[in-house]
Amino acid sequence: MDKIERRKLIEVALGKREATLKIENANLINVFSGEIYLANIYIYDEYIADVVECERDTMKPAEKIIDIKGKYLAPGFIDSHLHIESSHLTPYHFAEAVIPKGTTTIIADPHEIGNALGEKGVDYMLEASENLPMNQYFLIPSCVPSVVGLETTGAEFDADIIDKMLDKDRVLGLGEVMDFVGVINSDKRMEDIIDVAYQKDKFLQGHAPEVVGSELSAYLCGGPVSCHEVRDGVHAKEKIRKGMIVDARESSLSKNITSIVENIKGFKSPRNFTLCTDDREPKDILEKGHLNDCVRIAVKAGLDPIEAIRAVTLNAVQAYHLEKIGGIAPGYFADMVIFDNLQDYNVEKVFYKGRLVAENDQMVVSIPKPVLELENYNSVTIKDFTEEDFKIKAPIENGTMEIVGMEYLSRSRSVTRKKVFTVPVKNGYIELEGTELNFVAILNRYPDNDNIALAVVENFYLAKGAVGTTYSHDSHNMTIIYNNAKDAVAVSKRIAEIGGGVVVVEDSKVVDEVLFPIAGMLSKKSAKELSKDIFRMNNLLKQYGIETASPITRPSTLALIVIPEVKMSDIGLIDVINQKVIKQF
């Protein structure tokens, strides 16, 4: 804001210049004082000029007046942690979906597309999010790959590359530091990466699943300040007490807000507590909501409504050291949300920088959709794999043998553990027919690399056929879960043809598919169009046995080698805690 803009705001505040907009009779949620009271808000262009209690208003001039008749007015909602790629939408289609739900600012970590396409992937996200009627801020991925030496991705970010990328426009800091083992053990690479962000006074986003006690203290001493991986509310208490920012998550797969709120209700207005969506599918956004849904869930779990609003406004702003957003006050940007009540949070109007951008769940302004070269680039490069490549060769010809694999602990969580299975062997190869196990393969899908790793998994529940995806945290290599090698071959060939996505095969024939041609993880479709595809795919996968909140996302968790205790990569079965490849037999 230059001095001329400041002078005009002063004049509006004093009633010497006409406001461009006045919001009358608002039940204002004041996140600074913790009050709700009737107020009138005077706006000039992008900024708020004055906030006056209704009974004290001298009725200053305004070009346009909107009387909201006691509806609630809050600052625009701010998502403290998410991955746009998890919605499978481009940044501009994502904006189109979340703005009508009241979200006016997001802080996104593009580490999915960063792992796939490197710096040009991050640049794509920045370019595709320009000139939108919302704020899209970004963090530079800290773990590309998530753990060096344990997986092979499309890029590798060292401290020098990250140092340069931190200076890009709309970049607030370093994305989730997933290698918590490296931080705790003072790994030089992680120390150097954290230090470049630390020296630039940038935000250091954390990721510390199941990390407690002295190890949590060590992680915090290492630099990261936040965690969205809190699944147990008891852990949230410890983390908040230790000054860590807890981003309570409600994604399509991980639903943690209720447990966290139930455990911290006794705390008095913790400032290091926010709400976030992390990974939310377009259908959930359109039907359940975005941050407004998180607020609804938090309040239902017992969080005071004002504290819930603070968790998606002021608390997030203070965490990221943002200025002039997150509150309704003189000199602040006029990012505002109008909703009906303090239980349902049904958003009726959304303002961004003083302009009405959404009303009654619909955008009322157009979203710019740029033409970008990367959107037509096929990033899936794999060799012509055969059935032999998808068979696990045994050290015996026939009989039974023991093999180390992985076991899911529940249908709803991504946590797995190592388990030894006794499996049949026929003609020199492991056979799983007649067992409740599935094969899993991770295929490297980047140039000049033909890695393929095989293992067995229990409690994935794929009853028949095969499912494959290139949306595969965090490497986004191709993950295939299958029962026979023929179906796995068919999946690999089809995914390569379409440039990425999710494909289901049975009897060597494609049953259904959802295309993610941009970087193997993003669709070219709008949220409404894509949600139909994902809904159809989820229903199909449930029929195939994958009964979970988000079946289409379930395969991606197999390759998440920063979530305890055992996962898979293109190199092999990985011991997450000890960071080494496990010998299977």
Image: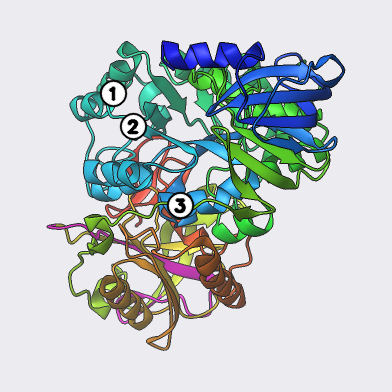
The question of residue 429 being in magenta is answered with: yes
Q: Label 2's element? A: loop
Query: In terms of depth relative to the viewer, which is nearer, 195 or 20?
Result: 20
Counting residues from the start of the chain, the first of labels 1 and 3 encountered is 1
Q: Which residue sits at x=36%, y=21%? A: 185
Q: Which residue is mark 3?
A: 367
Q: Name the residue rendered at 43%, 51% in the picture.
A: 92
Give the spatial CA distance, label 1 vs label 2. 7 Å
Is 229 situated above or below 528?
A: above
Q: Which residue is mark 1?
A: 193
Disc 1 secondary structure class? helix
- The quadrant of the picture occupied by the C terminus is bottom left
Q: Residue 28 in the image: x percent, y percent?
A: 77, 26
* Residue at image point 29% right, 47% down: 124
Q: CA distance from mark 1 to mark 3?
A: 35 Å
Residue 356: quadrant of the picture: top right
Residue 532, image x and y in percent?
A: 56, 71
The residue wearing badge 2 is 142
* Amino acid type of the residue that numbered disc 1 sits on in the rendered structure: Ile
Answer whether residue 575 is magenta in the image: no
In the image, 240 versus 45, the foreground residue is 45
Foreground: disc 1 or disc 3? 3
Magenta span of residues: 425-448
Residue contact at pointers 1 and 2, CB within 8 angstroms: yes
Colouring scheme, one of rainbow, by chain, secondary structure, one colour? rainbow
Q: Secondary structure beneath disc 3?
A: loop
In contact (CB < 8 Å): disc 1 and disc 3: no
Residue 571 position in % (x across, y down): 27, 52
Mark carried by residue 358:
none
